[in-house]
Image (cartoon, grey):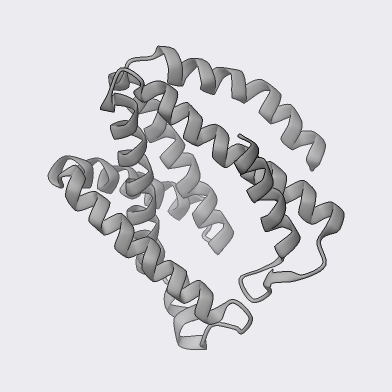
Amino acid sequence: MLKQRLLTAVVLIPLVVLAILYLPTSILQWLLAGVVVLAALEWFSIIGFSPKPQMLFAMVVLVFTTVISFLLSTYSLSLISVMVWGLLLLLISRFAHTSLPIQIQTLLKQPISALIIASIVLALFWHSAVKLHQSTDLGPQQLLYVMVLVWLADTGGYFAGKRWGKTSLAKAISPNKTWEGVAGALVLGLIW
């Protein structure tokens, strides 16, 4: 698994860096739309949808992402983003060490709920990345900075958690995540 991740990173990272730095936003936004579709497919696969509904729902997410980005202002999407992430933080902190109530688990696995949540989260990602890229002359560098920060935090969290991880972070949500992994993510992020 690690070997496959590293091989994928070696191939994709240079392409992503070049795309972010040298493509105009008008083209990059379409590549990011492809990322949204791939993320939606993975999301629905994890939930357990069969391949045909996965593709259908991924296309719905893409349409929703496009529509919401054109209908709402950057300010509105920023406000929605803060509200969504705040709500998720509350849910995670409330249920980090206990199981979600059965009613909520069932609701989250319903196709319409999964579709709505994925659409909102992925639309916010797409819109934020596109707006940051086109924001100033340094927009591409700023987007690359954020992407590298996320990659490094993920890498630091993975390796620190693998090596020293003992204290569970949120057993009910993700049993393999540890506080030591969080420390590794923070250290690499701060170094960057």
Image quarter in which the C terminus is found: top right
Q: Residue furthest front?
A: 191
Image quarter in which the N terminus is found: top right
- Left or right of 5 in this view: 139: left
Check the image and report above or below for 9 versus 159. Answer: above
Residue 103 on image: x %, y %:
45, 86
Residue at image position (68%, 29%) is 8
- Left or right of 112 in this view: 101: right
Q: Is residue 178 visible?
A: no
- Left or right of 55 in this view: 65: left
Check the image and report above or below for 20 versus 33. Answer: above
Residue at image position (48%, 35%) is 146
Q: Residue furthest right?
A: 163
Residue at image position (51%, 34%) is 147
Q: Residue furthest top?
A: 22
Q: How many marks?
A: 0
- Left or right of 93 in this view: 37: left
Residue 154 on image: x %, y %:
64, 45
Check the image and report above or below for 156 versus 136. Answer: below
Closest to the observer: 177 or 105? Answer: 177
Q: Is residue 16 visible?
A: yes
Closest to the observer: 89 or 106? Answer: 89
Closest to the observer: 115 or 150? Answer: 150
Check the image and report above or below for 82 versus 28. Answer: below
Q: Classify residue 88 by image quadrant.
A: bottom left
Residue 119 on image: x %, y %:
34, 54
Q: Classify residue 85 by image quadrant.
A: bottom left
Residue at image position (42%, 41%) is 36
